[in-house]
Amino acid sequence: MTKAIRIFKTGGPEVMEYVDVEVGEPGPGEARVRHHACGLNYIDVYFRTGLYPQPLPAGLGMEGAGVVEAVGSGVTHVKAGDRVAYAGRPPGAYAEARVMPAAALVKLPDNIDFETGAAMMLQGLTVQYLFRRTFPLKGGETVLFHAAAGGVGLIACQWARALGVTLIGTVGSDAKGELAKQHGAAHVINYNTENFVERVKEITGGKGVPVVYDSIGKDTFIGSLDCLSPLGTMVSFGSASGPVPPFNLNELASRGSLFITRPTLFSYTAQREDLDAMAAELFDMVGSGKVKIEINQRYALKDAAQAHIDLESRKTTGSSILLP
Ligand code: NDP
């Protein structure tokens, strides 16, 4: 028996229960992993509330790092004893150990510790695909990135700096603005006290930006479109303030033939060679020190509910982990 978080219904943080579960042996294509640390991500909130539906009862958590204990038939890229990290479905990472599809597992380089591995896979691979694949940045661009002091945000600030990209970051407080700046944001906007559309226009001399990376959703969607220059790309990749309501496609035409995409990490990591290439680039960014994973909150696994309360009430900065 091992300890794990389970939900038997969707709802607030209180629906998470810390229970004993049977882990069992891995079947074909599966691996059993003993976690040293698990990652906390905003997507966990969407699964807990039911915004992203899943059959119940269910586990939570999409990210972890630890050691492989056993593999099922057909698994050749990892073996018992390997240090690994992952970001993958289905939810269930909030656990001391789990059996999971081995396809998501990547060997963790020796120079990256388990806590960093657990904190960086989902958020770091996300920045990798946003900056390198969804709207590839070459350097020299000015971009708008919302929630710049969050988990994905602080990685994005540093990655943009390394690419020579001018990142305008939005944040919910002046203290978070300072943090984003320390990590490489060239400009910060407190969207609680300033009009971010006007500020982006000011900073870009009226031109707007070629791309907005928007994970806030409902509250920022239209404003983000207003920040784009003609033929610009809106990357809507999250809904921390609630889902984007239906909108008229003419909103894209009237602002100058805009493009829009609603990506998810798991489409980008579905092919093994893509996952390996993305992870290699992330490990290089972190291993070389260009990106430092800021673990600013650590919780015991049994306190996962408190972790969700802090994340949803915008108290956290950088990345957070749960420790079994
Ligand atoms: P964060 O650490 O960034 O936490 C979310 C932040 O969003 C808060 O700290 C807060 O920052 C901001 N925010 C703005 N409005 C609200 C609101 N109404 N309620 C709560 N928070 C709000 O989380 P993550 O780094 O885990 O994820 C960032 C975003 O990226 C999430 O929306 C997530 O779903 C998305 N994501 C999408 C992926 C994809 O592939 N599509 C993959 C990974 C993440 P502030 O106070 O500064 O406004």
Image: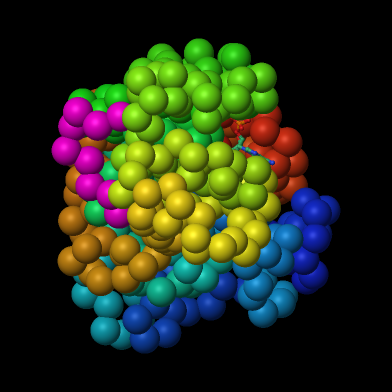
Where is residue 322 shown, x and y percent of the image? Answer: 58, 44
Where is residue 296 shown, x and y percent of the image? Answer: 54, 27
Ligand 1 is found in which quarter of the picture? top right
* Magenta stretch, overall SS: loop
Residue extending farthest to the front is 254
Q: Is residue 177 above or below residue 65?
A: above
Q: Is any part of residue 203 visible from this angle?
A: yes
Left or right: residue 76 compared with residue 268: left
| Residue 13 colored in magenta in the image | no
Where is residue 171 shown, x and y percent of the image? Answer: 56, 26
Q: Is any part of residue 65 visible from this angle?
A: no
- Residue at horizontal 43%, vertical 47%? 255
- Residue at horizontal 46%, vertical 72%? 100
Left or right: residue 21 compared with residue 187: right
Where is residue 234 shown, x and y percent of the image? Answer: 41, 50
- Residue at horizontal 29%, vertical 58%? 106
Which quadrant of the structure image shows residue 79?
A: bottom left
Q: Is residue 320 above or below residue 80?
A: above
Q: Nearer the viewer, residue 155 or 286?
A: 155
Q: Is residue 187 above or below residue 5?
A: above
Which quadrant of the structure image shows residue 140?
A: top left
- Residue at horizontal 70%, vertical 60%? 48
Which quadrant of the structure image shows residue 11?
A: bottom right
Region of the chain picked out in magenta, as a range: 134-142
Looking at the figure, which quarter contains the N terminus? Answer: bottom right
Numbered label tally: 0
Left or right: residue 324 compared with residue 206: right
Q: Is residue 186 above or below residue 97?
A: above
